[in-house]
Amino acid sequence: MTGFAQGLLDALLKDTHLITPQLFLMVTATLMLWPGDLFFHRNEKHKWAPITLVILAVTAALIGRTPDGEGFSRMFRMDGLTRGFQMLCVLGTAATVALSVKLLNGLKQQTVEYYALILFSLSGMLFLCGASDLISMYFSLELMAICIYILVAYLRERSTSVEAGVKYFLLGAFSSGILVYGISLLYGAAGGTTTNLADLNRALALTPTTSNLLVFSGVLMVLMGMAFKVAAVPFHMWSPDAYEGAPTPITMFMATAPKAAALAAFLRVFGAGLHGVSSEWVLPLCYIAGASMILGNVTAVKQESMKRLLAYSSIAHVGYMLLGVLSGDPRAGAQAVWLYMLIYIVMNTGAFAVVIYLQGKGEGERIEDFKGLGRKHPVLAFAMMIFLLSLAGIPPLAGFFGKFYLFKLAIEQGFVTLTTIALLTSAVGAYYYLGVVAQMYFREPDGEPAAPMGATSVFVVTVACALVLVATACGPWLVDWAAKITWV
Amino acid sequence: MFITFALITLLGALGMLLQKNVVVAGLCMVAAFFGVAGLFVLLANPVAAALQIIVYTGAIMVLVLFVIMMLNSHEEEAGAARPVQRWLSLALIAVLAFAAVKLVLASAGLNALAVKGAEMPQAMTLQKVGTTLFADHLLGFEVAGLVLLAAMIGAVALTKRNL
């Protein structure tokens, strides 16, 4: 029996170098809760934000240093795809933490649990990016999601926040059930021997035609469960409510980091993993992508709340990114999605930073609150205009670059109808983004004095704005970076 | 023996559906769980039977009873659902059950069983479960532990009066 235990320990230590970033995150987050929290007085909790940022910087460095490889009985794999998307998750998380400080200070809701839960969620995302087995994928997804359910309901005195949290939690629990059911069907269809994606793909491609129905329902259920996590139509119902009710930094968090991680899983499971049974999932995924683009953009037009508008716009953006998952060339698809996600995170961060700033003064929730911003805060309004135009994909801003790269790939792969829908709905998207710009520049302000903005927010807005402005000029470098998103 | 356990399961499930009092319905569910555990024993799978009792009758049932107690709805429900919904759900169940039975009857495994005759399945032993859990699925197991930790922190963060 000692031999068995020794073997276990060896197996555990052999592969630990693959997950050093996650281990580091888990250990520090636990230490932050205890004994770390004892060192700070009740009024000093805001000091956890800079500490969290330092932890995130170290995590990013660790991700860069982690070698390629596969381990834990082929449950986790570190490669270009994993590393690239892990970096995106860290980026989105860092932006969230930087923007949380001022809002939480204003609400007197600073706690160590907030930051620890964000770090726990991040470690789930890092696992998810590299999960090469359906079992490890499911558990990482749950770790990521369960922290976000709690963060959505974090402002527990506000009924909207609690309502959003409960809605998200209940629907998320059901979708997880569907996902696990799908996984079990695939496991059974492949002969009940493996859940590893590569093995599963091989086994499923050989299944007799009689179990086609089993494979199809399994693939469809996994697809549904994952589409829920990225909020693609028709599994998007939770997202506008959850986005609106959550504390705004968490809204931004949901729109960026978990989406990057879930898309990485999407790419790994469908793009790279189950391409042997692609006939089962390409058509449903086409419908999901097309419906996301249409419904996301069209519904966004009528929204009056800025957060709901951004929620619907994020549904539409997910629809675009699913084009990359559909790509018959998974590597090129992954690169295009990565590039799009990077640019999307930067411009979304900027837009949310402006919303959070306005919210600090008790507005920013409604699109009307933006009227006359061009008169009151010329610089801020300019930055917001850049972000919105970039989200709309107007050249020469970065958003256009990402869209161009993605749509070009989709056309090359023969998804002409879908790309046409994407282009048409982008035009619809430009309409509502420009509507906000028009509010800022062509409407008279109410005449309120301007409030100071806080150093971190100024920094975030400036950096994001600069990046969006110059990113297109750096196109070749961006493409070089994206070329590293590859695997053996 | 099979008939006995199958009857216990079926009657338990039916009792749960038809019973108006939620607590009695919950106890009927326990009976159904025990019936399923008996079926597992007949399949020469005592580990699965033990897990069925520990996990379902132990953990899940307690959870269900907690919810019942918290909602505090001992009184019988008044007013039935709309008849249309009832018929629709019945039709849906019939279709699903028919499809499931047909799927099982059409499956390749069953045909092979009819030709070759049943062979004794390999028993699932505790040791095998442990090895799979700690060797093959180590990562999933560890992450599951983290999920529980995060859930615990979240429960505290959401309910404690003064953080």
Image: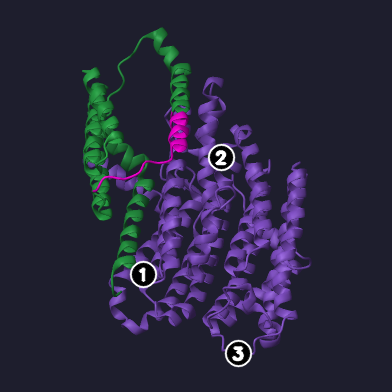
Image quadrant assignment for residue A458: bottom right
Chain A is shown in which shade? Answer: purple
- State the image coordinates of residue B127 (x, y, percent, origin top left): 25, 34
How far apart are labels 3 and 1 at the CA level?
33 Å
Camera-near label (2 vs 1) is: 1
Q: Nearer the viewer, residue A449 or A99?
A: A449
The disc numbered 2 marks a residue on which chain?
A
Position of residue B67 in the picture relative to residue B93 (left or right): left
How far apart are labels 2 and 3 at the CA level?
53 Å
The disc numbered 3 marks a residue on which chain?
A
Residue lying farthest front? Answer: B79
Q: Give the amino acid at mark 1.
A: Glu
- Which residue corresponds to mark 3? A450
Image quadrant assignment for residue B58: top left
Chain coloured green here: B
Q: Residue at x 38, y 67 (%)?
A: A116
- SS label for mark 3: loop
Instruction: Report the disc number at residue A273.
Output: 2
Report the span colored magenta.
B75-93
